[in-house]
Amino acid sequence: MTVTPDGSAPTAHADITDKELVEIASILMKRRTFDLSVYKDACMKRRVAIRIRSTGCRDATEYCDLLRRNNHELDMLRKVLTIHVSQFFRNPSMFEKLRSRILPELFRTCSRNDSGVMRILCLGCAGGEEPYSLAILLREHFSAEMRSVPTSITGCDIDDETLRMARQADYTEDRIKEVPVVLRERYFRREGSRFQLVPELREAVSFHHGNVTSVAEHQPSDLVLCRNTLIYFTRSDQEKILHGIADILPENGIVVLGKSETLVGDVRRRFTSVCPVERIYCKVKPDSDRSNIWQTDYHPKSIKEE
């Protein structure tokens, strides 16, 4: 969910025309090499409206004038356009599926690979809640496996300030509300009204600046999480991102999407479903018989999550 700087939900800003959005996109590209065209127009108009109201500008034309002469506002706009609000263990049922089904098989597979390591990549990692949740999950349930299969977790985001906050790993209580009390006491240190993640878990995750639409920036990975990120992009760029993910996954590698996201276009040939409810997919050879080490566990009558 997108929020305004004061925490309220934004309203639509009907006064922003397509022409004005193109002008704002041109300014961002020229001065920050930020490509707005890959994002959905309606979403971007709502987020631009946040900054127009916050700066007190009367309309988009006045706001464009501000952008041309104010570097700080350019940076604030880019931050708003790319912000993702997250929390630890968002959608707990997905993390439970990783624990019980996905990670055990990935450890077995990676132990037989030439590299003998497992790499996990979180795209659009926001404030680090998702990769740190994985670090907690691994520490709690797979310590023995990690002694024989070294495991790396990487968070990737386009916003440098967001990455700085992720590395700091200092959170408000609402961000950790899904963390069980026993894990909260074990892995967080309370400092006033905020919660600091313990150093050993901060050191378990590395963060890198990167654009989710740029395949060259992605590292080879066995498990990729790209949750609640595709929804902001146009369909053609969703397909481009998914092809990029497929390119860096080995055969039988796993990608996890958000609950409201799914595979689109030709990229569907490169994946088969492992758990439709949790949007978990396995990479397969295109046009193959789609056989893989993952047999779908989708049984409509037994799914409690729906």
Image (spheres, rainbow, N blue to C red):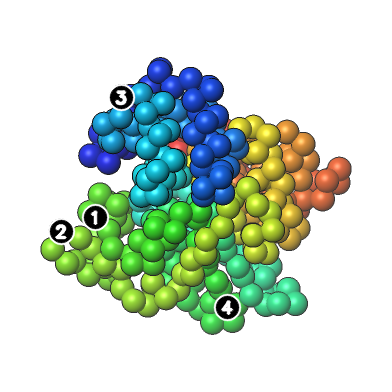
198, above or below 61, in the image: below
Q: Considering only order in the chain, which callout, 2 or 4, is on the residue closer to the N terminus?
A: 4
Q: Considering only order in the chain, which callout, 3 or 1, is on the residue closer to the N terminus?
A: 3
Q: Name the residue tied to disc 4.
A: 150
Please name the amino acid that badge 2 sits on.
Ser
**Split into 4 quadrants, where in the image is the N terminus?**
top left
Q: From this viewpoint, is residue 128 visible?
A: no
Q: Name the residue tied to disc 1.
A: 172
Q: CA distance from mark 2 to mark 3?
A: 37 Å
Q: Name the residue tied to disc 2.
A: 193
The residue lying toward the viewer, choosing from 270 and 53, is 53
Please name the amino acid that badge 1 sits on.
Thr
Q: CA distance from mark 1 to mark 2?
A: 7 Å
In the picture provided, is 89 more to the left or to the right than 264?
Answer: left
- Identify the residue at image location x=65%, y=52%: 214
Residue furthest to the bottom: 147
Q: Considering only order in the chain, which callout, 3 or 4, is on the residue closer to the N terminus?
A: 3
Please name the amino acid that badge 3 sits on.
Arg
- Identify the residue at image location x=61%, y=59%: 223
In the picture provided, is 122 more to the left or to the right than 58?
Answer: right
In the picture provided, is 274 more to the left or to the right than 56?
Answer: right
- Helix, strand or loop under label 4: loop
Give the label, 4 or 2, closer to the camera.
Answer: 2
Q: Considering only order in the chain, which callout, 2 or 1, is on the residue closer to the N terminus?
A: 1
Q: Considering only order in the chain, which callout, 4 or 1, is on the residue closer to the N terminus?
A: 4
Q: Name the residue tied to disc 3.
A: 58
